[in-house]
Amino acid sequence: MELKLIYPNIPFWRAEISRLALFFGGIEFEDFRPSREEITKMKSNGTLPFGQLPVLQVDGITIAQTGAIARFCGKLSGLYPSDNLFDAAKVDEVIDLATDITNQIRPSIREKDSKLRFKMRKELSESILPRWLGFLEKILDDNGDTGFFVGGSITIADLAAWRLCGWISGGIIEGIPKNILTTFPRLNTHQKKINALPKIIEWNNKFKK
Ligand SMILES: N[C@@H](CCC(=O)N[C@@H](CS)C(=O)NCC(=O)O)C(=O)O
C-alpha cells in the first residue's frame, strides 16, 4: 500500500497524529510537506476534496478529515482499539475534543486587529482554555493511573492530546502563557510521559534544526 500524507512543514496535531502513528508502527509513507505555492495549486486542481489539509492518499485515492485519516493510520499501526468498541469511541472522543479546542483558538489566529486579538487571547487564557483543558484532564483522571487517555497503552488519542497541548503551552500562540497546563497535573504528567517515549525522541531528533 502506498501512503502519502500531505500537510505543511509544521508539527501541528492534525498531521502529527497520523505521521507519528505511522512512524510508531514502522509503516512507510511519503511525508509530503508542501509549500504555500504547492498548496494553492492543490486547492485549484482538485487534489484537496474540501480545500483543506491534511489529506492522505492511499494508492492514489484521497482521504480527507483529520479524524478519518488518524483512525486509518491508527488502525494500520495498532494505535487504535480494534476489538473494543467502547475504547474506540473514547479515542474518537479525544480527537473530537482536540478539534473543538482548536476551533476555540482559531478565530484569534485569524483576527488581524492586534488589540482585539489580545483581548481574545486573554479570555482564552483565563476562562475558555482552562475549561476545555479541564475536560481533557478529566478524561485522564477517569482512566486512572495508566497515564494514558484510553486503556492501558498509547493510542492516537494520546498523540492528538500531546501535540495539541504542546502547541497551546509552547509559547507560540502570543498571549497564551507557557504555564497554562500547570493547574492540570494529569495533563502535565502526560506531556512529560509522551515526550520521554523513545519513538517521540527519535522523531523529534529527525526534525531538529
Ligand atoms: N475539518 C478539517 C479541518 C482541517 C483544517 O482546518 N485545515 C486547515 C489547516 S490546519 C486548512 O486546510 N485551512 C485552509 C482552509 O481552510 O482554507 C479536518 O478535520 O481535517
Image (cartoon, rainbow, N blue to C red):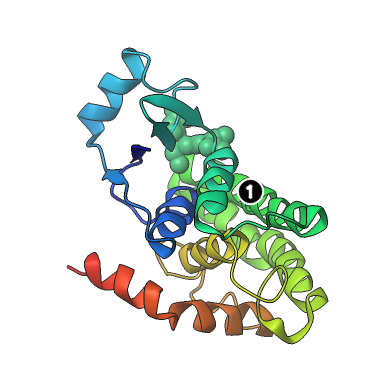
Counting from the top left corner in percent of width and height, residue 134 is at 74, 69
Q: Nearer the viewer, residue 35 or 22?
A: 22
Q: Residue at x 52, y 41 (%)?
A: 69
| Residue 90 falls in image quadrant | bottom right
Counting from the top left corner in percent of width and height, residue 37 is at 21, 28
Quadrant location of the C terminus in the rendered image: bottom left
Counting from the top left corner in percent of width and height, residue 22 is at 42, 55
Asked whether residue 116 appears in the rendered view, the answer is no
Q: Residue furthest left?
A: 209
| Residue 171 falls in image quadrant | bottom left
Above or below residue 186? Residue 129 is: above
Above or below residue 38? Residue 168 is: below
Report whether 74 appears left or right of 126: left
Q: Residue at x 49, y 48 (%)?
A: 14
Residues packed near mark 1 inside 10 Å, few (<14), some (14 to 19) or many (20 plus): some
Q: Secondary structure at mark 1?
A: helix
Q: Residue at x 68, y 66 (%)?
A: 133
Q: Nearer the viewer, residue 13 or 124?
A: 13
Asked whether residue 110 appears in the rendered view, the answer is yes
Report whether 43 appears left or right of 167: left
Quadrant location of the N terminus in the rendered image: top left
Q: Nearer the viewer, residue 193 or 97?
A: 193
- Residue at which label 1 appears: 104
Above or below residue 13? Residue 142 is: below
Q: Residue at x 60, y 77 (%)?
A: 181
Report whether 26 appears left or right of 74: left
Q: Mark 1: which amino acid?
A: Gln
